[in-house]
Amino acid sequence: MNLVLDVQGFKIEHNKFIVKELAGYDGQQICHYVFKPPFALDLLPPDLQTQATWLKQNHHCINWNSGFTPLHTFPKIMDDLTKHADRIFVKGVEKANYLRRFFRKPVIELDEQPRLEPASTACFYHSKPITMCALSNVFYLYSQRQTKWRARHHDKNSPT
């Protein structure tokens, strides 16, 4: 089974990534989580508070305080989510490297170009209707992956 994953999040001290939103899609099943913050926003240094506010207003548009899933459950969720996957696809080197820490299966990095553009959200956690939604991203990336696979498969079977 091919599984496409996407994460959105925030950076905290020492450039550490904190996942806020996780989505996965394998062509039949979806998963989607929005994680509780690890601590109060006002405990971040002022520059990182500003960055978190910018991400909330201009990128993924998810509030730091949003979420229902405890962050400490992320490794278990990743284990359950990837246990039946043969191939895991992630767009971008930074996200791929982050996710590799949570499972041993190979991660295939999808090209960073063309870059993902904000799109209509597929969930209700975002404060704007057009944004970087992990759930919308996995649907889009999966369909793009299938289109490329079909084109390659068709080319191999075409008479020359």
Image: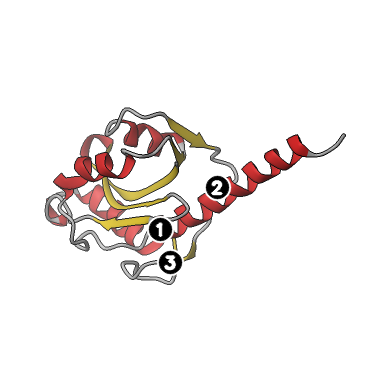
Circle 3 residue: 121
Furthest-right residue in this view: 160
Residue drawn at x 21%, y 61% as measured from the top left: 67
Against 43, residue 78 (above or below) is above
SS at circle 2: loop
SS at circle 1: helix
Against 137, residue 119 (above or below) is below
Q: Which mark sits nearer the N-terminus, 2 or 3?
A: 2
SS at circle 3: loop
Tell me where residue 9 appears, x and y as whole percent: 31, 50
Comparing marks 2 and 3, which lies closer to the viewer? Answer: 3
The one of 57 and 30 positioned closer to us in this rendering: 30
Circle 1 residue: 135
Tell me where residue 71 appears, x and y as whole percent: 17, 49
Classify residue 134 by image quadrant: bottom left
Cα separation, mark 3 vs mark 1, equals: 8 Å
The one of 144 and 2 positioned closer to us in this rendering: 2
